Image (tube, helix red, strand yellow):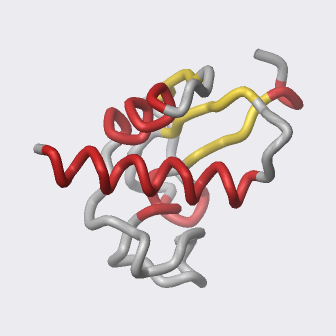
């Protein structure tokens, strides 16, 4: 995927333990504790988003922790709305497990 055709999704965006200034991008109420790459990818796939996992990458704010990231092909929706939908699916997945 070319650089401009994707959205980068970091696990830190959904972590309820992280502050907004620390990198969280969804509301604390929507966020989950310790999000994993496989959860994010599964939620993205459930939303029919074309995604790729890069597990050796590190978020710039937490460069020492290689949590990885998920790349999602851009759609007409905004990044924030995609993040909210992915987070909602992640919570749904956790409630069924």
When asked about the image quadrant of residue 95, the answer is: bottom left
Image position of 35 (left or right of 76): left
Looking at the picture, how far across and down is residue 71, in whole percent?
Answer: 62, 31
Q: Residue at x 44, y 52 (%)?
A: 11
- Residue 29, above or below 32: below
Residue 46: which quarter of the image? top left
Q: In this view, does 30 lie to the left or right of 38?
A: right
Position above or below: 87 against 41: below
Q: How many marks?
A: 0
Frontmost residue, 58 versus 5: 5
User: For residue 66, what is the image quadrant?
Assistant: top left
- Which of the image's four quarters has the C terminus? top left
| Residue 29 on image: x %, y % | 40, 80
Residue farthest along the top direction in this orientation: 1
Asked whether 62 or 54 is in front, the reply is 54
Q: On screen, 89 above or below 30?
A: above
Where residue 10 sits in the image (x, y, percent)? 53, 50
Residue at x 45%, y 62% (from the top left corner): 14
Q: Quadrant of the N terminus?
A: top right
**Residue 45, percent across and down?**
48, 26
Q: At 79% across and 34% down in the image, what residue appears? A: 75
Farthest residue, direction left: 97
**Left/right of residue 93 with respect to residue 37 in the rendered view:** left
Q: Nearer the viewer, residue 93 or 40?
A: 93
Residue drawn at the location 42% of the way across and 37% of the way down: 43
């Amino acid at each position: 995927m070319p650089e401009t055709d994707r959205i980068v999704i970091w696990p830190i965006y959904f972590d309820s333990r992280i502050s907004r200034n620390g990198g969280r991008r969804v509301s604390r109420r929507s966020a989950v504790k310790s999000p994993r790459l496989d959860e994010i990818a599964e939620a993205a796939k459930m939303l029919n988003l074309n995604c790729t996992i890069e597990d050796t990458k590190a978020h710039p704010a937490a460069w020492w922790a290689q949590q990885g990231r998920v790349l999602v092909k851009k759609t007409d929706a905004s990044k924030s709305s995609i993040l909210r939908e992915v987070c909602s699916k992640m919570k749904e997945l956790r409630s069924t497990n």
